[in-house]
Image: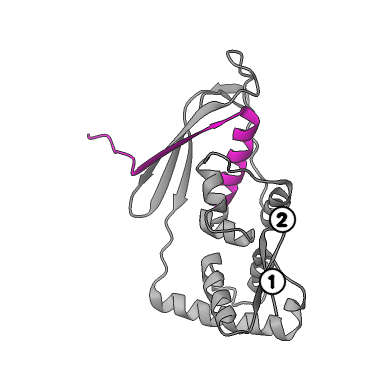
Amino acid sequence: MMTQKPIETYAGMLTQDEFVRHYAYVDARIKAGYSPEELSFMMGRAPYYFTDYERMESGARLNSRDLEILNEIFKNQPLEWLSLEKDELHGYQEKRLIRVNVFEDEQTRRYEIQQPWRIKQLTKKMGKPTVFVERIRNRNPKEARKVRAELDYVLMRLKNRGFFQQPRLPYRIYFALTNLANRNMNPFPNELKTVLYQLLHEGKLLLKTIEGQMHYVG
């Protein structure tokens, strides 16, 4: 049997603490079903913001405000904090190489993470690669149009109630509308983004940047 080749490979340098945090938030993103770009949008950041962090790009960091918002986004989803065996060969806070190979088929995207530390799991110590498996979403165009129409209706209800009198971060809008929208819809954050941008274009909402984060007001 031929070995499957990764469709993509990327790498970065992280300390143990940085890797534990990185693992927790990428794991939470995948379990919640958001793309990196959608999570950036929910945080009120540029589309590449969380993507750069996830790909361990040089200089990509999450500040204290980012962490507060991520903890709000994932407040109903316990974060998984890895317990790593102390690195005896290198300083505990010395950066080590982390490499990610990405494999894909029609239904899933698999991230195989090669990292140098041993993970303590119950009474076992494991040194094998850690893996994330992400389901590839697929919404047909007709259903997508129906969802966007529902979101437009709900956003106008929120606006009429005065919800947008205060500047709102996208994650707060997303959770507010999911409480009002048809429960069978399960809207994706990128669908909310499309509708919000249309409302901006129509002049029904305004975009306001506060401390580097995009808020919606109207």
Q: CA distance from mark 1 to mark 2?
A: 13 Å
Residue at the image position 52 percent from the left and 71 percent from the top: 191
Q: Is residue 76 visible?
A: no
Say which quadrant the C terminus sits in.
bottom right
For label 1, the crowd category at 10 Å Cα-Cα, with few meaning under 14, some 14 to 19 and many 20 or more, is some
Asked if residue 147 is positioned above or below residue 171 in the image, the reply reads: below
Going by the numbered disc 2, the residue's amino acid type is Glu
Image mark for residue 205: none
Residue at the image position 41 percent from the left and 64 percent from the top: 138
Q: Find disc 2 in the rendering and name its residue.
A: 72
Residue extending furthest left?
Answer: 1
52 horizontally vs 174: left or right: left
Image mark for residue 176: 1
Q: Position of residue 8 (x, y in %)?
A: 37, 43
Q: Position of residue 25 (x, y in %)?
A: 61, 45
Q: Is residue 178 visible?
A: yes
Going by the numbered disc 1, the residue's amino acid type is Ala
Indicate the secondary structure of the residue bearing disc 2: helix
Q: Is residue 25 magenta?
A: yes
Q: Is residue 135 magenta?
A: no
Nearest to N terminus: mark 1 or mark 2: 2
| Residues shaded magenta | 1-29
Asked if residue 70 is positioned above or below residue 9 in the image, the reply reads: below
